[in-house]
Amino acid sequence: MKNTRDILLKFILPLSLISCQKSLEERPKTVAVETFYNTREEVESAVNAIYTPLRANTIPNYIATLECQSDYGYGRGSWAQMNEYQGLNDVNTTRVSGFWSDFYLSIRNANFVIRNAPNGNAISETDITRYVGEARFLRAFSYFHLVRNWGGVLLRTENNISETDLPRSTPEEIYALILEDLEIAETDLPDNAPQTGRPSKWAAKTLLADVYLQLERYEDARDKAQEVITAGKYALVPVASTADYQKIYGPAVITTPEEIFYMKYMRQDGQGNYMLWITNHPSTGYFNFGGAYAIYGDNRNPVYQTWDDADFRKGLWNNINIGLGANSLVSSKYRDNQAVSQRGAGNDLPIYRYSELLLIYAEAASRAGNGPTADAMEALNKVHRRAYGFDPETPSPVDFNWQDYNAGSFLDLVMKERSYEFQFEGKRWLELKRTGRAEEIIMAVKGLSIAEKNYLWPIPRSEMNYNKALDPAQDQNPGYN
């Protein structure tokens, strides 16, 4: 069974002890830089604080919000409006405003580490390099999500921490910082992460490959993904049934050979994965605290109807009447019937898995060469074989032949494989936008048109009201003035 208390003790406790100490002794209201960031323990505690805004609430809710807009997913209750693809109403505007705040809180905490850790007087240069590299990785991670959902955003760095009023930067300026951070992180992070849940240099290279793909720098994306593949650090977990996917996503899993970077959770109230409550239905028995079944599927959806029944991933959907008719589907990808609370499930949330790296390589290699290669198809086939219970490393009866595809049809194949592989990992809507296929695919699958305003989220009113460098009439995203 997963002994996360031992695995993550050093990772979680510095954060929880802060609140515990408040009841034990009086502490100063603020931390002075001159007396903090000096020891390894202090800097590690500061790095841990970068994760806190993301892990606790934002990442599960953020992923769920993105899944509502996928071609296979639907939102219920307060999320139902997102199925209309006409932009966000007040409820969902408030929800994504919370994501904005938490991404920027994480960035702020990363900026403190980047600025102050190099001045530590009782910490080695090796540790400084690693912790600053980790902070840069996490800052790039947050900015990558901000820029894809809001467009040009505020460029807050270690050099302007005290400035409240900042203008919007262009997406190009945001991406320049992301690339700079990741190029440093891939050099300065260790070959092997010191703990599960922390990034290695290979995680930085994987994120960098994804950024290159987003920027249509296909040769760079291909080559960076290839670096990680040839390093031989990762492998797909074989499965022989749908149930075996719990070897990848289950609450008892500490780590797997395909884990590149995950958000880690544990069976402790407030430290667990909230995604299970969002997606589960009380009748499943998969989660002992019921569930909101706020994101669901439908067996009449063409994505589901055309999905091969022999693909084990399809079996992660359960046909359950959730009050919307007999065609509703509920995902069982994440399950924990020994969770300790709504926010106390032990399942981790994948951010990057080896299967995604393989598909990044497959797409980038094909785009760079204006058509698939044998290596690109082999990368895709590894993911596909595993889903049918075959050895990912051995040719199988379900393999595709690269010579049967051109650049366009191979991209279709990659996108279909990604849509099956990464459900409830928050990838699909961002992929539809990146490839310019959102309008076409949503119309084909759901019969809905997408309003232009739906492609970007509104900058929060709080930012508009208090940041004097922003003009609400000029700087707000289209359709939200």
Image (cartoon, rainbow, N blue to C red):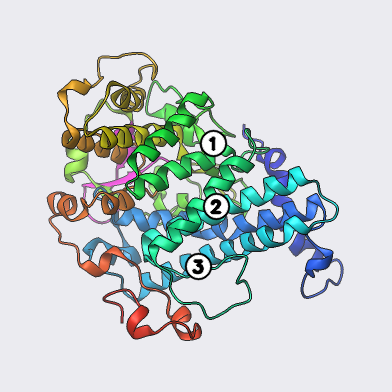
The residue beneath circle 1 is: 202
Question: Which tag, 2 or 1, sits closer to the chain's start?
Answer: 2
Is residue 9 visible to the viewer in this orientation of the structure? yes
Task: Tell me which amino acid carries mark 1.
Answer: Trp
Q: Residues within 10 Å of mark 3 (few under 14, many from 20)?
A: some
The correct choice, above or below, for 101 with respect to 51 in the image is: below
Task: Tell me which amino acid carries mark 2.
Answer: Asp
Residue 284 is left or right of residue 181, and the answer is left
Helix, strand or loop at mark 2: helix
| Residue 315, disc | none
Kindly report the distance in space between the C-alpha atoms of the residues bearing marks 2 and 1: 14 Å
* Residue 24 x, y percent position in the rendering: 85, 66
Q: Residues within 10 Å of mark 2 (few under 14, many from 20)?
A: many
The residue beneath circle 3 is: 155
Kindly report the distance in space between the C-alpha atoms of the residues bearing marks 3 and 1: 26 Å
Q: Residue at x 41, y 29 (%)?
A: 243
Helix, strand or loop at mark 1: helix
Quadrant assignment for the N terminus: top right
The residue beneath circle 2 is: 181
Residue 219: which quarter of the image? top left
* Residue 182 x, y percent position in the rendering: 53, 48
The question of residue 348 being in magenta is answered with: no
Foreground: disc 2 or disc 1: 2
- Of residue 144 and residue 260, the one placed in the foreground of this image is 144
The question of residue 322 being in magenta is answered with: yes
The correct choice, above or below, for 24 with respect to 205 in the image is: below
Asked if the residue at tag 2 contacts the one at tag 3, i.e. Cβ–Cβ closer than 8 Å, the answer is no
Residue bounds of the magenta highlight: 313-334
* Residue 53 x, y percent position in the rendering: 57, 61
Task: Tell me which amino acid carries mark 3.
Answer: Leu
- Of residue 327 and residue 169, the one placed in the foreground of this image is 169
